[in-house]
Amino acid sequence: MSTKVTMDELLATSDLKALKAGDVVEATITSIKKHEIWLDLGPYGVGVVMRREIGHGQQLEVGQQVSASVVDPEIEDGYALLSLRKAAKDRGWDELKRVMDDGEIIEVTAYDANRGGLLIELEGIRGFLPVSQLSADHYPRVSGADKDEILQKLNSLIGKPIRVRLLDASRKDNKLIFSEKEAIKDDMQARFSELKVGDTVEGVVTGVIDFGAFVNVDGIEGLIHISEISWERVEDPRKYVKNGDRIEAKIIAIDKDRLSLSLKQMGEDPWLKDVESIKKGATVEGTITRITPFGAFVQLTPAVEALVHVSEIADEGDDAVDPEKIFKLNEKKEFKVLDVNKEARKIALSLKDKK
């Protein structure tokens, strides 16, 4: 009559040490099933790995040599329950620490995305590439910060190779953070060193928002503030530029990681020409463009805007006058020019003498 012998009893008769949870063993894949993978452990017998714990993009084949971590040295029928992911993680954290310490640039691909960034698996460990760490080429610039549109743009990056550096690799906190910005930092610094204020550069508009437009200048992010789009008053930048437009702009400032650009300075300032026809004491006609508690702004020409102060609206005095009761947006009125200050680019008007 045969008696069932356990793995521990077999090992007791040999010089081999018994397997224990946490041990890492070398094994050969003998069979790949729908729900499990079977491994030959040599003198330790046979082990099994559940398919559900195989990492994203991990390709396995029969005959392949793998490292596995022991979860349970002996389950039903004497098999050892193993984990490829845990073994890979143990090796992976060591490798990731080396990569981070060396500042190495590596290539990764995202397997998923959420509104905060891209999900990436490397060395069997899942990590994250935040939106804030994407380069200008990949940053999802959208109007109004539409979350669904941001996610759509991020989804388009899934499966595409991205060069990154590691910002954080903490085994203790199980945190792995990637940065594309850090990977291109050296190249960006070299490009920045070749640029100077006053240079004309060419770029592609990547996003148009209420306060201006973002431009990709050969991988460097630039911003055209709404005040630098046109010499005339701009209410909506979207009427002047749109995503995908290729434009030329002038560099007016260089920050550590961004260019400040001007579209209007690519041409002559029409204010200087138009203001020559506006003389102190003259009567001019203008259109009300803004009404504030301290007065109203008046468009005299497409390039020239003037101010009629509340004290110059009526004789009653500042406290008694409400500009919103005197003016209506877009209405035309005649005013007297009180002062023209070319250096300060200011023109003062009065309504008193024209009432």
Image (spheres, rainbow, N blue to C red):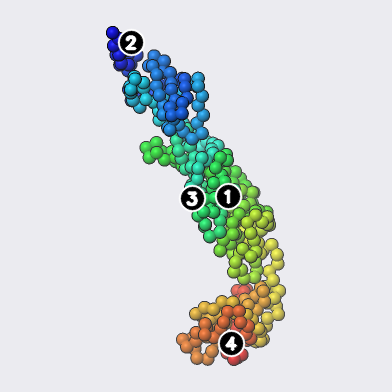
Which residue position is annotated with label 4? 351
Indicate which disc residue 136 carries. 1
> Does residue 88 show up?
no
> Does residue 219 show up?
yes
In space, the residues marked 4 and 1 are separated at their CA atoms by 50 Å
Amino acid type, mark 2? Ser
Quarter where residue 346 is shown: bottom right
Residue sitting at x 70%, y 80%: 277
Give the quadrant of the C terminus: bottom right
Secondary structure state at the residue bearing disc 2: loop
Furthest toward the top, the residue is: 1
In space, the residues marked 2 and 3 are separated at their CA atoms by 57 Å
Q: Earlier in the sequence, mark 3 or mark 1?
A: 3
Q: Earlier in the sequence, mark 2 or mark 4?
A: 2
In space, the residues marked 3 and 1 are separated at their CA atoms by 17 Å
How dense is the environment of label 2, judged by Cα within 10 Å: few (below 14), some, or many (20 and up)?
few
Q: Earlier in the sequence, mark 4 or mark 1?
A: 1
